[in-house]
């Protein structure tokens, strides 16, 4: 006769031990905490990078440089006066700097340049009149596309429900 080796069966426990369920709950909680921590770090980085916390107003040189990036070079194609080295761009930069030094607001500087050169001097299109369609048409097209996709998937789900209701189940 051979002697049988005793086998040990796992005992059922009521305590959550090192099972997959216990690890899953802790894993989900850890994932949530990591996600929340990442969001907090992102929010702090955006607040610091945006300059919201700085209370100093921009200097006249900073304002002039910002305006130079928004104004088109009069003799070049689609580049700002800040990027161009043409004589007309240099003249516009000097004019912007003198207007800012004299205390003119950004809107007043832009309006003076529009009066001299026309509305095409600004790199950004105006947000009023017929030019506002440049901003509205993509929004309307996006909303229509989302609505069309929603209607497509809604109709498809209805047809699948009707097909499932009409076909009897096959039992094995």
Image (cartoon, helix red, strand yellow):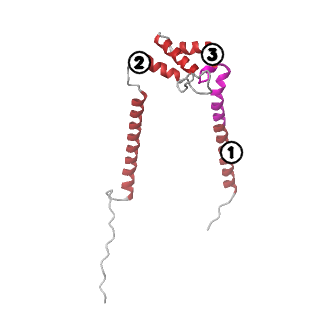
Q: What is the CA distance from the residue labelled 1 to the residue labelled 2?
A: 56 Å
- SS assignment at label 3: helix
Compared across the picture, whether 116 is left or right of 14 comes to right
Residue 127 within the segment the image draws in magenta: yes
Quickly name the residue at label 1.
155
| Residues rendered magenta in the picture | 120-144
Which of discs 1 and 2 lies nearer the camera? The answer is 2
Q: Position of residue 59 (x, y in %)?
A: 42, 18
Residue nearer the viewer, 10 or 143: 143
Mark 1, residues whose alpha carbon is within 10 Å: few (<14), some, or many (≥20)?
A: few
Q: Residues within 10 Å of mark 3 (few under 14, many from 20)?
A: few
> Is residue 12 among the parts visible in the rendering?
yes
CB under 8 Å between callouts 3 and 1?
no
Q: Is residue 84 left or right of residue 133?
A: left
Check if residue 76 falls in the magenta segment: no
Nearer mark to the viewer, of 3 and 2: 3
Q: Which dot marks residue 57? A: 2
Q: Residue at x 68, y 21 (%)?
A: 130
Q: Which label's residue is closer to the chain start, 1 or 2?
A: 2
Q: CA distance from mark 3 to mark 2?
A: 29 Å
Q: Residue at x 68, y 45 (%)?
A: 155
> What SS does tag 1 mark?
helix
- Say which mark, if any, is on residue 77: none
How many other residues sit within 10 Å of disc 2, few (<14), some (14-19) or many (≥20)? few
Q: Position of residue 146 (x, y in %)?
A: 63, 38
Using the image as rendered, state which of residue 127 and residue 153 is in the foreground: 127
Mark 3 lies on residue: 117
On the picture, is 158 further left or further right than 85?
right
Residue 139, compared with residue 130, is above or below; it is below
């Amino acid at each position: 006769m051979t002697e049988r080796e005793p086998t040990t069966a796992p005992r059922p426990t009521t305590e959550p031990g090192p099972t997959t369920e216990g690890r899953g709950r802790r894993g989900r909680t850890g994932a949530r905490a990591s996600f929340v921590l990442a969001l907090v770090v992102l929010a702090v980085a955006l607040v610091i990078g945006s300059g919201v916390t700085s209370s100093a107003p921009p200097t006249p040189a900073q304002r002039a440089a910002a305006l130079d990036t928004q104004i088109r070079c009069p003799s070049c194609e689609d580049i700002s006066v800040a990027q161009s080295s043409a004589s007309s761009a240099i003249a516009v930069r000097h004019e912007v700097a003198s207007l800012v030094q004299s205390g003119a607001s950004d809107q007043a500087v832009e309006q003076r340049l529009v009066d001299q050169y026309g509305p095409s001097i600004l790199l950004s299109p105006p947000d009023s009149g017929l030019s506002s369609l440049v901003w509205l048409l993509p929004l309307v097209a996006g909303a229509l596309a989302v609505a069309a996709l929603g209607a497509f998937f809604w109709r498809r789900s209805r047809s699948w429900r009707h097909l499932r209701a009409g076909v009897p189940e096959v039992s094995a």
